[in-house]
Image (tube, rainbow, N blue to C red):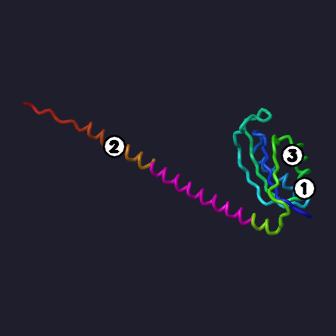
Amino acid sequence: MLHHEYETIVIVRPDVEDSGVATLAEKFEGVLTEQGGHILDRENWGSRKLAYPIAKHLRGHFIRLSYLAGASHIAELERRMRIEDAVIRFMTVRLADSVDVPTRIEEASVQRAQREEEERRRAAEQAERDRLEAERVALEGEAMALREREEKDRASVQPTDVAE
């Protein structure tokens, strides 16, 4: 069967918990895989402010699904998204036609590994910055306490009055 590469962005109601968002994404992935599609990547972009209100919501959880599937699979996926009450908006875009499935799956796994490595590197850098900031704040606190102690010592040592 001929597969195309698609990407779908789903916006979920903001009152749905993170576990519910993950369950919903897995449900949509299941719809694709049971019909012979291949999931390349899934990203949870988290809760974001919407550009304009959608169904009286100002925020939404964003999910990006990247996958390979036939054109007929998209109709079923979108039908199920329309039925799902938690989904307030979605959009599917065809990225490529007639994709070589094994090659594209391998490329996607390499890209995912690179992205995960970059995320780990950024998290380590942020942890180091946080550690240095905490150390700086602690040193400033110690310096302030030392200055206060010195000022207190100077104030307690009063010059003695010399009798004339």
The residue to which callout 2 is attached is 147
The boundaries of the magenta stretch are 109-136
User: For the stretch drawn in magenta, what is the main secondary structure?
Assistant: helix
Which circle's residue, 2 or 3, is located before the other in the chain? Answer: 3
The amino acid beneath tag 1 is Ala
Residue 95: x %, y % from top left? 80, 56
Please check the rendered image and state whether residue 127 is part of the magenta-colored stretch, yes or no.
Answer: yes
| Disc 2 secondary structure class | helix
Q: Which mark is residue 71?
A: 1
| In this view, 8 is above or below 48 | below
- From the viewer's perspective, is 119 left or right of 32? left
| SS label for mark 3 | helix
Horizontal side of 33 relative to 108 (left or right) equals right
Q: Residue at x 74, y 41 (%)?
A: 60
Residue at horizontal 69%, vertical 39%? 49
Is 155 in front, or is 35?
A: 35
